[in-house]
Image (cartoon, coloured by chain):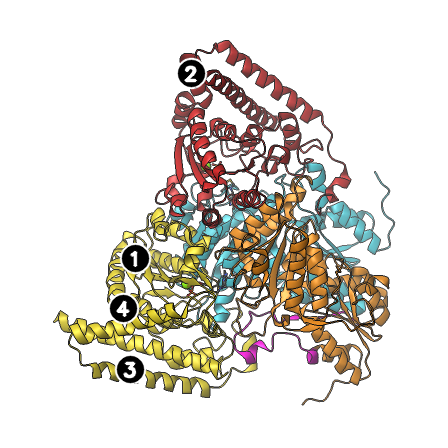
Chain colours: A yellow, B red, C cyan, D orange
Amino acid sequence: MPAVVDLDRWVAAYGLMATIRAFEEGVNQLYITAKMPGLAHLYTGQEATAVGVCMALGPQDYITSTHRGHGHCLAKGASPDRMFAELLGKAAGYCKGKGGSMHIADPDTGNLGANAIVGGSAGIATGAALSAKRLGTDRVSVCFFGEGALGQGVLYEVMNLASLWALPVIYVCENNLYSEYTLYTETAAGSLRARPEAFGIPAWEVDGQDVRAVYAASVEAVGRTRRGEGPAALFCNTYRYYGHHVGDINRAYYRSKDEEQRWRAERDPLAILRRWLVEDAGVDPSVLDELESHAQAKVAAGMEFGLAAPYPEPEEVGRDVYA
Amino acid sequence: MPAVVDLDRWVAAYGLMATIRAFEEGVNQLYITAKMPGLAHLYTGQEATAVGVCMALGPQDYITSTHRGHGHCLAKGASPDRMFAELLGKAAGYCKGKGGSMHIADPDTGNLGANAIVGGSAGIATGAALSAKRLGTDRVSVCFFGEGALGQGVLYEVMNLASLWALPVIYVCENNLYSEYTLYTETAAGSLRARPEAFGIPAWEVDGQDVRAVYAASVEAVGRTRRGEGPAALFCNTYRYYGHHVGDINRAYYRSKDEEQRWRAERDPLAILRRWLVEDAGVDPSVLDELESHAQAKVAAGMEFGLAAPYPEPEEVGRDVYA
Amino acid sequence: MSTLRTAAPPDTEKAIREITFAQAVREALAEEMRRDPRVIILGEDVAEAGTPFKVLSGLVEEFGTDRVIDTPISEAGFTGIAVGAAMTGLRPIADIMFGDFLTLAMDQIVNQAAKVHYMSGGRLSVPMVVRATLGATRRSAAQHSQSLHAWFGHVPGLKVVLPSTPYDAKGLLKTAIRDDNPVLFFEDKLMFQTRGPVPEEEYTIPFGVADLKREGMDVTLVATSSMVQVALDAALLLEQDGISAEVIDPRTTVPLDAGTIVESAKKTGRAIVVDEGHERYGVTAEIASVIAEGAFYHLDVPVRRLGAMDVPVPFSPVLEDLTVPTPERVAAEARALCGAPRQREG
Amino acid sequence: MSTLRTAAPPDTEKAIREITFAQAVREALAEEMRRDPRVIILGEDVAEAGTPFKVLSGLVEEFGTDRVIDTPISEAGFTGIAVGAAMTGLRPIADIMFGDFLTLAMDQIVNQAAKVHYMSGGRLSVPMVVRATLGATRRSAAQHSQSLHAWFGHVPGLKVVLPSTPYDAKGLLKTAIRDDNPVLFFEDKLMFQTRGPVPEEEYTIPFGVADLKREGMDVTLVATSSMVQVALDAALLLEQDGISAEVIDPRTTVPLDAGTIVESAKKTGRAIVVDEGHERYGVTAEIASVIAEGAFYHLDVPVRRLGAMDVPVPFSPVLEDLTVPTPERVAAEARALCGAPRQREG
Ligand SMILES: Cc1ncc(C[n+]2csc(CCOP(=O)(O)OP(=O)(O)O)c2C)c(N)n1
Ligand SMILES: Cc1ncc(C[n+]2csc(CCOP(=O)(O)OP(=O)(O)O)c2C)c(N)n1
Ligand SMILES: [Mg+2]
Ligand SMILES: [Mg+2]
């Protein structure tokens, strides 16, 4: 009975978004308590995008991710324990600790990797779509990127190619308004969605804080693409709650506390979904509370695992340079 | 009296187009007779574009050119003798013979250089526009490129920047249908003019074989740009009569003799201008015939100069590496 | 040394047919594409045109446009697509028409292809080949004449191949295509029409095995790609002066067969390294320092380096010809090392 | 040698103030921007943010957004614009946040900026500076930790600067901005907060003049950028073993002060070259071969090279720390060269 199926789906989506939220809180704690090497770029506030898009994908579908990639990684099916291990540089990490936050990859769940080069994964995602087409699988490939990547020419090179060859790739732009410390209007001229459209790629623009809207658009885009009708583009309007990275504490010079507050108060993706589940779908709030505490518990356990896990052996430094 | 002024302008334009035509015939002869080192990419057939655009520019304005750059170079004011010397690797060449056909530059006439990297001069032209704006001159900068350069991402990077900063640069795309041996529809998805437009850059599309149409659009684009209203784009539909380069003799596998014949017979830029001058503007054909023989004589003399000119001294090889 | 013997064309009674370097490359591609349907080619004008050098002529007719794929002028784009395709089940060959255009794909090659295997802890790999060209003296000027292979030797995760004969080209390219790592394969534009013996039978040539192109006693000439023939011609000139030159071709600069190179230098006590890349911070520096360290106690004279002159490649033939090592210059350097009198001018 | 003396902070009675490497860079930029209105800065988050490293903080307040210009994330685009601006009357400084991103601008730097002057027969020039960073051990992993300066030394037409102290950074950057050629200026990310003496008075430091950072008799340590302090620390360790190490900092790898380096090696008879770029086909190869050739008859032992390990930079701290030369490793190599017993472990 679809209605129920649907309900389960949205309840599960809530749990997944809560897990991402809890995971990033954990990462921030690790940073603040100086337990994590280096920096990390938190996904908090953008949960609905990763979850809404990945809900429309199958486990065999591919994604490529960014420096702000923990949400994509979890949404595609990775588990917090090995992710924490990776962020902490431990041997049990998804990449043996060699990649870290900016390079987490998990081929088993179709995640071809985060990328520390802005726009750097556009070619990889498009190439994965070429493989899908040549090998005759029905896989689709999703390229997640921030609006800052719209400055990189390679994005347009591969959009042109994907359109020419009708490749099953979907370009998902998460417009969280800022690239580092600069508002997107200062770095992007003209119209964002006109760019893929200029290459003959249809584009959808959605409220990135409403997971149901993101999912609906993704289903359309994925369906079209999987049917062999060529690439699609999706623009999700969203916001990052924290700084560009965990160390970006004083942000007043590029955005106001008030702006941050308004997004948290009025546009929070979990609150928006919760309201709909409770008020429109009649879900008992306690169900959602339970999902949240479950998410927190899972994340806490994952962090424990990561902290307790051993570092790689020194010999590992010379391994995996060549296959 | 404008009408007359206009007439002089078009008669002069005819002479310039005839000079470019004659120059390229000369280059082809040098190749066929094995007197020229390397290869050259002939501009024959596209004369109306370089001439129509450069007529709308002042001597102080900048252009950047391409591997198919002889026409741009002449249209901006360079003279055949030193150009031939350059193509022949002689010390008297515009670049002391160090640049050759693909790198001819003549700062005195505002030509910042041909470029052997497709799309390679987009940054240079845009940077020259930045200089004009910062230094408060009213110079504009024109970036000539073939439609093949639309495949290069850097073009979109600089279009975005030029639009954001309202730089006085005009992107002139000469669509001669082919990039090397491939029809543009096989390498360009979507709409060509939608690309600059996506970055907020207005675009004109004109018949590149009609120098008056090219000029009219250029005057509009240049005027707007010089007034500080930002960059513009111009798409000129044209055709190259010869092969991709002088050595590209057997072309049947990528375009038909019939197609070539039709362009030469029906769409020749000199014939189109001549018809208008004679039939609509009442110019005596002998005037134009004289311009042609004068052009041929100038080119012949220039070739003589180039052939007779000495090669650079061996010490030159180590000079000009650093300023 | 057996390592060296593996490199020479197999001894056989019946005369070995001669084909051009371009044909050898084409045969390697065709054989591997027949053997493995996952192998595809991406590049500008690679299909009907068979590239401006006609190296690929005929491949699209056999394998179709699904596997021999024309791209727009988008070096970064199609190289990046090749990386992603390699990570997901294909074995792409990206065709970079002129090595100079590698500058446009450096992020894809260096930050992506070279590092994916390591960054993923070995869980992903990038079995791709980047075919590119090198070499000057074609009157193509500064942006179409560079030999940039040294850069890639500096990047862990990449392998770098520099064939100098049709035989080596075929055997090394087949190995490159079967390798599970990103391999940069450089072809000398001027060598495409060079003919040489290439057996009909299937063979491959392992990476990291230098080839003894000529045996000698007095001086070791280590030469790569286009410079191997220059070194062999120099050896003939030296023979007339009674100087016996040994010519060693590393064939791959990564991995580098340091052992064979150093052993030869120990034997002769004199070494010259010749490479068409610019001399400064180039391949000659690495190999010369490997020799200087490894053969330190056996060298009679300092190792000499001969790379391309450190100037952008000029168009004018009279200047361009001064920038690349010639047999005469190599021979002159060798005579100087051997203390033999330099030949009289003219 | 007088060339060396010019490099040291001028002898003066009053104590010289100490400022950080970042402040020294900022001062150089501010002074040159005041002196010459044609100097502009282009880059990502260079204005209000003053770059993620805060090196440029305050400049936009003084010079405005017309001269300190934020760009989109378009390394190729804004570097290309800098090239064109430099050809037409401005003196741009392109800010490449992480040296790893130079891979995106290689065509603009190598095919355009480096060659315009030569290709135009000297009629055009490109007076621009590319400021970039290098250095690992910041836990930034493989795409934010590379030291790619060796590549640019291989490209004629470019100059390459590697300051190792606040004093050198200021003097060399002012020289770079006044140079009429494209200059690659590399700053070690870990050095930004390092303090050192920098006089108030105006000064510049010429390119191609190595600096004697420490005088010694037994072994020459040639070190660049981040490795200069490593070499100095190694020298202290060696002192305890009675080994006197000389530390030479080339400061610019193009032009390279081969004379000073070779003279030192002749004096000590032993040399180690230390650079944070990967060892293979890197800066250590060029300098080691220059020494091996120039000091051939004076060397007691082979020249040793110490570069970064030839692996992509791993994220995990326990692995990353193994990839970069340390004072202990440099000292151990030096002891080996000097035949002194290695220190007992632990
Ligand atoms: C090629 C490149 N240039 C610059 C950077 C430095 N950098 C890291 S993240 C970032 C901003 C990215 O903004 P956006 O794409 O909108 O993603 P967001 O951080 O907002 O998620 C920049 C400039 C980089 N990593 N790669
Ligand atoms: C970056 C780069 N890639 C490839 C080439 C080889 N190439 C030279 S001209 C050309 C075709 C250019 O076509 P177009 O831009 O339409 O100019 P046209 O030749 O038609 O005038 C190509 C692919 C090049 N010079 N530069
Ligand atoms: Mg953003
Ligand atoms: Mg064309």
Give how far apart the Cα atoms at labels 2 and 4 are: 65 Å
Which is more toward the observer, B282 or D251? B282
Q: Which residue is mark 2?
A: B275
Do the residues indicated by labels 1 and 3 lie within the same chain of the protein? yes
CB-based contact (under 8 Å), mark 2 and mark 1: no
Check the image and report above or below for C104 versus B184.
Answer: below
Identify the disc placed on residue A205. 1
Q: Disc 2 and disc 1: Cα gap in Å?
A: 52 Å
Spatial CA span between label 2 and label 3:
80 Å
Q: Which mark is residue A292?
A: 3
Estimate the x, y position of residue B258 in percent, counting from the top left: 38, 26
The residue lying toward the viewer, choosing from B299 and D131, is: D131
Residue D239 pos. (x, y %): 79, 82
Q: Which residues are magenta?
A: D301-329
Kind of element beneath mark 1: strand
Crowd around label 4: few <14 · some 14–19 · many ≥20 (10 Å): many
- Which chain does tag 3 point to? A
Residue C243 sits above or below residue B311 on the image = below
